[in-house]
Image (cartoon, rainbow, N blue to C red):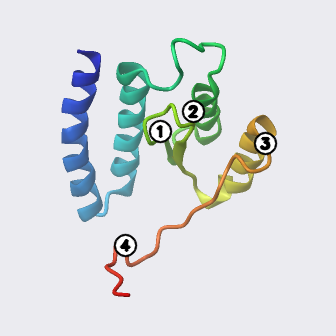
C-alpha cells in the first residue's frame, strides 16, 4: 500500500516535472525531484535492506546530500535504491564540496560527475 501511494503520486510528479521544464521553471523541477526522492525513501522503503539494516549507505548519502545542498539543487535515490545509487543535481559552486564529502565517506570512485547535453535526447543513427 505504501508503494502504491508513492507510484500514484510520482506519476503526477512526472507530468508536473515535464510542465516545469517546458515553462522554464527549473527550481520547481528540482523541488519535484526532492519530493519524489523523499517519497521513494519513505514509502518505497528501498534505501536499505531490512535483512541488512546495519548497511545504510544510500540513506547516509541522501542525508549528506541534503546537508550539503540545503535547498540548492536536488537529490534522490535512483535506480531502485538497493543497487546503491543516488542522483544529485549539484550547483557548480557546490560541486567540489559535494564530491569531496561523498568520497570522504564512500571512497574515491563513489561519486561521478555527469553533464546533460544541451540537445537532450537524440536518436543516433549508426
Q: Residue at x 28, y 22 (%)?
A: 3
Where is residue 39 drawn, in percent x and y?
36, 27
Marks 3,1: beta carbons within 8 A: no
Q: CA distance from mark 2 to mark 4?
A: 26 Å
The crowd level at tag 3 (other Cα within 10 Å; few <14, some 14-19, many 20+) is few
Q: Which residue is disc 2 drawn over?
A: 62
Q: Nearer the viewer, mark 2 or mark 3?
A: 3
Q: Which residue is disc 1 drawn over?
A: 76
Q: Quadrant of residue 36?
A: top left
Q: Residue 72: tell me if it is visible.
A: no
Q: Earlier in the sequence, mark 2 or mark 4?
A: 2
Question: For numbered disc 3, what is the local secondary structure?
Answer: loop
The crowd level at tag 2 (other Cα within 10 Å; few <14, some 14-19, many 20+) is many
Q: Earlier in the sequence, mark 3 or mark 4?
A: 3
Q: CA distance from mark 2 to mark 1?
A: 7 Å
Where is residue 60 drawn, in percent x and y?
63, 27
Q: Which residue is disc 4 drawn over?
A: 120
Q: Quadrant of the C terminus?
A: bottom left
Q: Nearer the viewer, residue 15 or 124?
A: 124
Q: Nearer the viewer, mark 3 or mark 4?
A: 3
Q: Earlier in the sequence, mark 2 or mark 1?
A: 2
Q: Earlier in the sequence, mark 2 or mark 3?
A: 2
Marks 2,1: beta carbons within 8 A: yes
Q: Nearer the viewer, residue 50 or 31?
A: 50
Question: For numbered disc 2, what is the local secondary structure?
Answer: helix
The crowd level at tag 1 (other Cα within 10 Å; few <14, some 14-19, many 20+) is many
Marks 3,4: beta carbons within 8 A: no
Q: Nearer the viewer, residue 14 or 55?
A: 55
Q: CA distance from mark 2 to mark 3?
A: 16 Å
Q: Which residue is disc 3 drawn over?
A: 107
Amino acid at each position: 500500500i505504501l508503494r502504491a501511494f508513492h507510484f500514484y503520486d510520482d506519476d503526477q510528479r512526472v507530468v508536473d516535472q515535464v510542465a516545469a521544464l517546458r515553462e522554464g521553471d527549473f527550481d520547481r523541477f528540482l523541488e519535484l525531484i526532492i519530493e519524489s526522492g523523499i517519497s521513494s525513501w519513505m514509502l518505497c522503503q528501498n534505501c536499505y535492506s531490512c535483512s541488512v539494516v546495519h548497511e545504510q549507505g544510500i540513506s547516509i548519502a541522501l542525508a549528506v546530500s541534503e546537508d550539503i545542498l540545503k535547498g540548492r539543487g536536488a537529490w534522490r535515490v535512483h535506480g531502485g535504491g538497493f543497487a546503491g545509487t543516488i542522483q544529485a543535481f549539484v550547483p557548480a559552486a557546490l560541486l567540489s564540496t559535494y564530491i569531496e564529502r561523498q568520497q570522504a565517506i564512500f571512497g574515491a570512485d563513489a561519486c561521478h560527475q555527469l553533464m546533460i547535453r544541451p540537445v537532450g535526447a537524440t536518436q543516433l543513427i549508426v
